[in-house]
Image: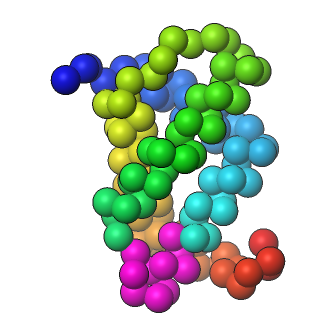
Amino acid sequence: MSDIDEVLARELELFYENDSQLYKTETAWVINFKRKIKKGVYNSELAIKGIENNFIPMVINKYRKEVAHISDVDKATKHFMAQRFVKNFEEEDSIGEYDELNLKRGGN
């Protein structure tokens, strides 16, 4: 198993937190997770898988185009990033951070 590149993971996290397009995409994921919680079907493991397979590759591709070419990001690092994304979401949700989000479709 390969080692997690925590420095690269943090750099990519800072990139998506400060990019307006990726921020909107991140918010869409949060709204989706909140809807699933409301319906009672939210699953942390599936959330991690969804982020790892969809959002993280989007971040990596945009970073490569706009900032710097980076070699392939290994699966362990992508999984680590996805776990942190979901953990942060769950922690912020537990303290009511997203209570004011409009969960209606088309209501962002």
Which quadrant, please, contains the C terminus?
bottom right
Which residue does the image show at 42% across and 60% down from the upper left? 47
Q: Point out the residue furthest to the bottom here.
A: 39
Residue 6 seen in the figure: no
* Type of colouring: rainbow
Task: Classify residue 46 as left or right of residue 54.
Answer: left
Which residue does the image show at 67% across and 12% down from the upper left? 68
* The magenta stretch spans residue 66: no
Residue 52 figure quarter:
top left
Q: Main secondary structure of the magenta part?
A: helix
Q: Nearer the viewer, residue 74 or 93?
A: 74
Task: Classify residue 98 as left or right of residue 23.
Answer: left
Residue 90 figure quarter:
bottom left
**Residue 11 position (above or below residue 29):** above
Residue 82 figure quarter:
top left
Which residue does the image show at 66% across and 81% down from the upper left? 103
Task: Classify residue 95 as left or right of residue 19.
Answer: left
Residue 107 seen in the figure: yes
**Residue 19 position (above or below residue 25):** above
Which residue does the image show at 51% across and 70% down from the upper left? 33
Q: Which residues are magenta?
A: 33-42
Image x and y of residue 51, in percent: 48, 50
Image x and y of residue 46, in percent: 37, 62
